[in-house]
Structures are given as C-alpha cells and as structure tokens.
Image (tube, rainbow, N blue to C red):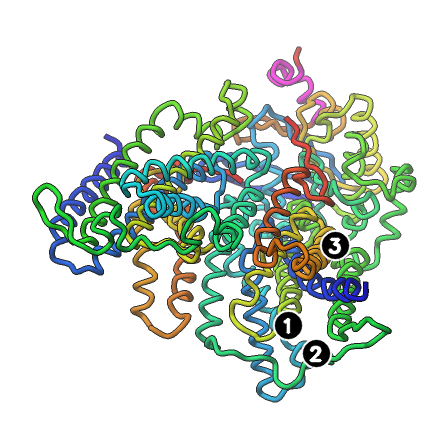
Amino acid sequence: MAPLLELQDVEARYGPVQALHGVSLTVGEGEIVAVLGGNGAGKTTTLRAISGLVTKSGEVRFAGRRITRAAPERVARIGIAHVPEGRGIFQELSVHENLRLGAYLRRDGFDEGYERARAYFPWLDDRRGQQAGTLSGGEQQMLALARALMSRPRLLLLDEPSLGLAPIVVRELFEIVRQLNEKDGLAVLVVEQNAKLALRSSNRAYVLEVGRVALEGPSAELEQNDSVRKAYLGY
Amino acid sequence: MAEFFQQVVAGLASGSIYALLALAIVIIYRSTGVVNFAQGEMATFTTFIAWTLVDHGLGYWPAFALTLVIAFVGGIALERTIIRPVEGKPVVTVVILTIGLFIMLGGLTNWIWKAEVRSFPPSRPFPTDAWHIGDVAISKQDVGILLVTIGLVGGLWALFQLTKLGLALRASAVNPTASRLVGIRVGWMLAFGWGLAAAIGAVAGLFTAAASPPLEPNMMRPILIYAFAAAVVGGLESAVGAVIGGLAIGVALNLIATYDEHLHIELDRVRLPIALLLILTVLLVRPAGLFGKAVLRRV
Amino acid sequence: MSRLVAARTAVTAIALVLAIVAMFLAPRWDKIGDIKGQQMGVYFIAILGLNIVTGYTGQISLAQGAFMAVGGYTTAILVVDHGVRDLWTIPIAALVAGVAGFLVGIPALKLSGLYVALATFGLAVAMPDILGWDKLDAVTKSGHEIQLFNSPDLIGKGFEDVTFLGHTLTFTRATYYLTWAIALVMLAVAWLVLRGGPGRAFRAVRDSELAATSSGVHIAAYKTFAFALSAAYAGVAGSLLVIAVAFADPNSFPAKLSLTILVGAVVAGLGSLWGVLIGAAFVQFLPDAAVHISKAQGVPDAVYGAALILIVLLLPTGFAGGLRRLFSPLTTRLYTRS
C-alpha cells in the first residue's frame, strides 16, 4: 500500500541559505512517525516544506497526489493539519473563534468537529469566550491541537509540541495524540527535541542532521541505537 | 444654546466623514500593516467617477452604489498589483509606495477632470433644507450623513463579528501564517480589506462633496489629516476608536470654529495644527491610542 | 579590492568628474541651469540630513521640510529685521533648526516607527498654517511673507552681480556655487560623523535597540542627536533656499517638500551616502522631465508618482542598495527593519 505521505529528495532554502539537502521520508496510514535532530537540523523546515510555507524542490506526495507546488491553503484543504512551532493560534481571538477557524474548510462540520474536540479537551466549553492569548502555555498547545482536529485531517503535523511546557502537560498531550491515532486512525508526523518521549510515542523515526536523514527505522530500535543514545538520549 | 446644539450636529456630520476615512485607514492597517497615505486621493478619484456617472444621466443613489462597487474592485486591484510585492518590507518602503500612489492619483485626477469648479448637479444625496424645532435648525443633510455613517459602521461590525468571512478577515490580520494553515486564502482576504476600505473611502469622498462643495481635486487633503488624527487617537488598530475619534474631532473643530470669535485666538486658521497637536498629545500620553491595546515588548 | 569597493570607487570618480565638468560647464548654461542646479544642491543637503535620522537611526521623519522652514525663516528674519549678513545666518539657522529637531526628537523617543512618521507628517502639513498664523506676525516686522530682495545684507541684494576672488558672478551663479560649496562641506561632515563613534552608535540603534542598550549605547541621546543633526542640515538647506529665492513665505515649505525629501532619500538608498547625489537629481529633474512628456495639467504628477511606485517595487533599497546588490550579492538588503 502506498504511504499516506511521501517526501523524495526534498531540498529547501531560506534565501541564500540551504536548509534541507535532500530529505526523503514516508508516513503510512495510521502511523506515528517522529523526526528528531538538534537545532538547525531542518526538522521544522521539513514540516514547513510539506505545508508549502517554504520554497523547495523535490517531490512531496499525499495519498498519491503531488502537492510539491501546493500553497498552504490547498495543503490544508486536502487533509493535512499543521500545528506549527509556537502553536500558531490566534492570540487575539477567543477560544471559540479559534475553533471556528479550525473548521473553516468544512461547510457542515463545526458541531461534529466540536464534539470530538470536546471529548478530548472537555475544558474548552468553559473557556469559549476567553481570549486565546491569555491561556496558559499548555492550554494554548491543547487549543492548537483541538483546532487542528476540527478539520478532520488525515495527517497531523506537529512541530515541537513540548516546547515550553511542563513535563506532566507534555505527557498528557502525547497521550491524547496516541489516543487520536489509535481510535481515529489519525496519522501523525511529529518533530520533537525531546527524543526519549518522541521515540516512546512513535512507531518509526527519522534522525535529521544538517538537512539530511542520518538515520531511520522503527523507534524501538533507534532507542537502542548507540549513536542515538549518545547524541540525543544522553546516555 | 440652540446654536450649540446645531453646531454639535454639524460637527457630528463632518466628524462622520473623518470617521469613515479613519475607518478605511484602520482596516487597511490592521489587515496589511500599511498606513495608506493615498486613502484620501483614492476617495477623491472615486468621487470624481461618481460625478461623471451623474453627469451622464445616472441618478444620484444609483451612481453612489455603482461607485462603491467600482471603488471596491479598484481597491482589490491595487492590493494585488502594487501592495502585495511590498508585503513584509520595511515600513519606509511601504510609506514611500503609498506616497507615490498619493501623488500619482492626484495627478490622474487633475489630468482626467481638470481643476474646474464643479458640484454634483443637480442631484444631491439629501435635501439641503433643515428641520426647525423651536429655535434650532437642524440640517437634513447633516442628519442624513450621520445616519448613513451609523448604518455603515453597524453593517461593518456585523460583517466582522458575525460572519465567517469577517472571522477569516480578522484571522488573516492577526496571524496570516496560521490562517493559511487552516485553509484561508489570505492573499484574497487582504485584497478584500483594501476593496472594503476603498469603498468606505468613496463614501467619505461623496459626503465631502455633498457637504462642502465644490468638488475639487484637493478636497480630501485636510480631511486625510483629520482622519489620521482620528485613527491615531483611537489607536491605529481600533475601529471603534477611529469612529469615536472622528466624531469627536468633528465636533471639537466645529465648536472651536464657532466660538473662535469670542476667544479671539483666530483658531480657525490653525485647525490643522490643532489636529496635529491632538495627534502628538495622544501619542505621547498613550502611545497605543485611547482605545488601543498597549503592546508589551517581551525582552 | 572587493567588487563593491571597486564599484564605489568608480562612483566617486564619476561624481568627481561630473563635478569638475559642472564647474566648467556652468558658464555655458543659462540662468535656469543655475537655479535648478542650486535647487538640487538644496535637496542634496536636506536629503543628506534625512538620511542621518531615517537611514542611520531608523526613525522615519516626514518633517524635513518643516525644519527647512525653520532654517529659512531664521535667515529671513535675521537678514531683514536685524541686518545680519546672510552668510552668517546660515550657521545660526542650522543651530535654530537643530534645536527644533532636538525638541521634536524628544517626544519621538516614545513612539515607534510608524507613529513617528505620522506625527512628523502632521508637523509638515501643519507648518504652512503655523507660519501663516496671524498671531505669529508679531515676531517678525514684516509678517509672514518676508522679502529679502534688495536687502543690503543679502549677496548681491538678490539680483546684482557679485565679485569673488576677482571673478564677476551673477547672483544666480553665485548662489549656485555657494550652495554646492556648502553641500560638499556638509557631505564631509556627515561622512566623518557617520564613520566614527556616532555613526556606529546610530547603526547599532537602528539594527537593534535592545542589543545597543545592552552594549551601553545611550539610545535616547543618540536618537535625539540624530534628529537634531538632521534638522540642522535641513536648516542649512532652508536657509540657502531662502537666500537664493530672496523670499520667504509659508508656501515655500509645503508638506510636499517633506515628502519630496523622503522620496529623494529612499531613491538614494537609506543608510548609505553613496546615492544621495542620485536622489537629489531624481527629485529635481524627474518632475521637469515629466513636464516634457506632456504639459497637460496633472500629467507630471501622475508620471512622477508612477515612477516612484516603479522604483519602490523594482529597487526598494534605492541606488546605494542597488549598487550593493549588484556588486556584493550576499548582503541582499541595505538594512532590515520592520
């Protein structure tokens, strides 16, 4: 079966600086795939390349269709939800408005999407009118995730979800992601600096270094890999 | 006392015009981050178009409506052609661009219509007589302008707060990247903002021509300054502030002009400097404007 | 030497050659050449000043024309009312305008870029009205329209020939040389200031106020100093303008003048001295060229505005930036500040 998402030899640049030197990876239906690497390795750029936020060459395919040249609006339309670094919520708008925006592309589906969101994040109801920027860091990240779910995506792109959050909140977050994957079959591509957590929560993983894939394989194996342990797991 | 009341109403009418232009400025600023120095000239240009329509036999209100549509389309075209390339560029670059637009439109207006004296003949938006209630004479035109402005502002509020399009517009202004990620065509939202602002500006221009004839190419220049003052007083990002600011400035300037004779300061000749003083004072005391949110800079 | 340095050396050489040519060519052109050349010199000085405050410290000032008015009126009042020799009024005009710039610079500290632009724009628009305010007429003996023509303290009384170092020059020729001589001096001063400590401080302020403060740069002092200095330049320019025209009135300093100077600075390329001559030439000669295209009313403005828009779209960093882009492509912008 063809993978849900496929990247082939993707190169990307920011002006004169090249960030990705030919990245190839796949995400299968219902898989959770992690992308690890240090600062500047190109993890965030990879997600932005998928979303069309950065100019690139190479091939990106989703469900068999080429989306290499697609603009972000179109990428969202075909079923990819991207939760960017820094959450990407609308700080000045209310929680409710953020969720409405998540469902922007669905003509019908606000109520249905909202039911799902509420199931995972029951506190959303009480805070509907609150300005998103006044939520705590963890709540904002949850809101970002809830917003991504509103469009019923097939693939979720998560960029550094644990950034700036307390460990217990991060665990909660990953638990929710795991449930979404198990119960709803949502495929996830997660970029994380917290290598241990990422490897524990994913099926497969890629390690990026200097814009290239240095290592890849089942997460359980990578967790035992010596170089990965030394470089990213600290032992 | 009667005089006072009359002048307040007149001030509200002229203030409505400042408020509308200020609103246009704020809409463009909020959505694209550009301070549009050409807003006044855009309004003048579209008002001249309206005049041409009326001159060729179209009734006033049909011409009014058609002009709004033309302005809307023109605003969208402007954003897509010359504003889009400078998105994200330094402030100075964008300022010069709108200044260039200001100069170019002014020149075009002069060239196409020449600087002859003209007023909207013979149709006018509102009857020019007045209601007499006791001692007080209230100009029907003033009331008409005020009512239409209130209606327009109300309609805009409804658009922005109650509709999906309005939500998308606000989202595009607040966080363009995140907006794109939820599927909003941000580019077109920004263009829509410009179209909307151009149409609102057109209304301001049309009312100016009606309230202070004759229609001439320079007519919006001082109004632009008052509109900037109103927008700034309200905080460049606050639509509510812009409207209240505009009305307040209209009333204040009118009262000053009226009672100037008693004060012997000859303030009437320095209305512009007074507006400037207002801008400066507000900016110094509350840089975010009276209605704006203070921006905290996280170090 | 690097290509950029080579290009700049070439530019300087060409400018020098042009200068010498202009000096010898001058006797061959008529009075109009003098007048336009002199005006260009005035723009040159004003643009130089604006570049200091906007290009080097990043504060957008739309009030350069207003400061020119301050300088110009200082000269007019001193010459006509107090019998001060015109040349001596120039440094005084610079001082007075500088103080005005300082006074404007202080409140500007509290405002962010765009608001400074708006506030100074308001100042520029209001200046003609302020100058024309009847209540201010008490300050000058002659009201707000001051006639320098025929004043004994003005070079050639505004119309007569002048003798200098044995040569006889017409009034227009003399003011032309005077203006450019002063312009060159001002350029040298700017170059020295910008090259040294203040220049580095200015650039630090522009690029990151936070980093500058942490490095010990006294932001407020440098920002207001920049405003004062640029206003002083404007004062000199305004003074020369009034001397050359032998007349001062509010309409000599409309809002459009401030806009013109800003346009000149942007076309020149902010943050660098290399393009100022081009900028001055642009604002001086493009409107004239536009008139040649068609004398119909409004066309010159339309062409000028369109040209401006094109330049901003195609060459946003101005002439100096374009030079840099051509010869030193890794630095794509002259500076970035949003």
User: Neighbour class for label 1 at 10 Å: few (<14), some, many (≥20)?
Assistant: many
Residue picked out by circle 3: B244
The amino acid type, in three-letter code, at marker 1 is Leu
As rendered, which of C20 and A166 lies closer to the eye?
A: C20
Query: Which residue lies most toward the bottom here?
Result: B57
Q: Position of residue B11 (x, y in %)?
A: 72, 62
* Numbered circle sitting on residue A75: none
Give the quarter of the image for residue C305: bottom left
Per the rendered image, the range of residues in magenta is: A219-233
Q: Earlier in the sequence, mark 1 or mark 2?
A: 2
- Residue at (48% x, 49% y) in the render: C138
Q: Earlier in the sequence, mark 3 or mark 2?
A: 2
The answer to whether the residues at label 1 and label 2 have Cβ atoms under 8 Å apart is yes
Residue picked out by circle 2: B125
Residue picked out by circle 1: B206
Query: Relative to residue C251, is residue B136 depicted above or below?
Result: below
Q: Is residue C74 left or right of residue C126?
A: left
Query: Relative to residue B195, is residue B66 depicted above or below?
Result: below
Asked if residue A166 is among those painted magenta in the image, a careful observer would answer: no
As rendered, which of B223 and A61 lies closer to the eye?
A: B223
